[in-house]
């Protein structure tokens, strides 16, 4: 089993199977062919949005694919809170049956918590959105918005492994 590998803003993990002692004494160049096997893990994707300094009431949608019936999600949100001023997070179609617990304040490092006994329907759609304003004096640039998984679980309280594809806000 390997360690997680990060490629861009997508986190992957890898596992070697079928490895045996056949390579223990290799002393020269060798070509090893690996087979990629796609997993169908639930995947949250944050949009990348283009905005201008001072733009108000912008939305970053967070989509969910391969939803197995997530009944709870806890993530830490990291972003530049001097450029992005978040004022609301709201559930959308895929999380329509879940409740949202608002953090004490929307600053980088805040926790977003979604929970419920059971989702209304199991959908692949937008899970939630983040509404924000852009600071009037925001310099042009790309500002990453990252979610760090704390926990995801299904209706039976089983942990669910998920993939998170982070997004960004591009101030032009």
Image: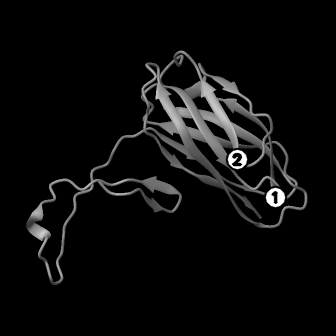
Distance from Cα at disc 1 to Cα at disc 2: 24 Å
Q: Around disc 2, counting alpha carbons within 10 Å, would you say few (fewer than 14), some (14 to 19), or many (20 or more)?
A: some
Secondary element under disc 1, as helix, strand or loop, is loop
Q: Nearer the viewer, residue 28 or 119?
A: 28
Query: Which label belongs to residue 52?
Result: 1
Please state if 44 lies on the left or on the right of 17 as rendered. Answer: right
Quarter of the image with the N terminus is bottom left
Quadrant position of the C terminus in the picture: bottom right
Q: x, y percentage for residue 76?
A: 64, 43
Rendered location of residue 91, percent (x, y) = 65, 28
Identify the coloring. one colour
Q: Residue furthest left?
A: 22
Location of residue 58 (image quadrant): top right
Q: In the displayed structure, does residue 61 sit left or right of residue 43?
A: right
The residue at the point 64 percent across, 34 percent down is 128
Asked if disc 1 and disc 2 are in contact, CB closer than 8 Å, the reply is: no
Query: How far across and down, in percent of the image, does residue 88 sit?
Result: 77, 35
Residue with the mark numbered 2: 109
The furthest residue to the right: 136
* Element under disc 2: loop
Residue drawn at x 55%, y 27% as measured from the top left? 72
């Amino acid at each position: 089993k390997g360690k997680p590998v990060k490629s861009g803003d997508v986190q992957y993990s890898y596992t070697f199977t079928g490895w045996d002692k056949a390579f223990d004494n290799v002393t020269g160049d060798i070509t090893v062919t690996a087979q990629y096997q796609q997993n169908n893990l639930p995947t949250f994707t944050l949009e990348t949005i283009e905005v201008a300094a001072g733009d108000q009431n912008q939305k970053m949608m967070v989509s969910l694919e391969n939803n197995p019936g997530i009944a709870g999600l806890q993530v830490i949100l990291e972003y530049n809170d001097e450029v992005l001023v978040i004022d609301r997070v709201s559930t959308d179609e895929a999380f329509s049956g879940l409740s949202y617990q608002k953090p004490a304040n929307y600053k980088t490092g805040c926790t977003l918590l979604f929970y419920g006994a059971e989702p209304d329907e199991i959908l692949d759609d937008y899970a939630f959105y983040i509404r924000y304003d852009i600071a009037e004096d925001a310099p042009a640039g790309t500002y990453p918005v990252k979610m760090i998984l704390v926990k995801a679980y299904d209706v039976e309280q089983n942990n669910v492994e998920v993939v998170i594809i982070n997004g960004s806000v591009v101030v032009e």
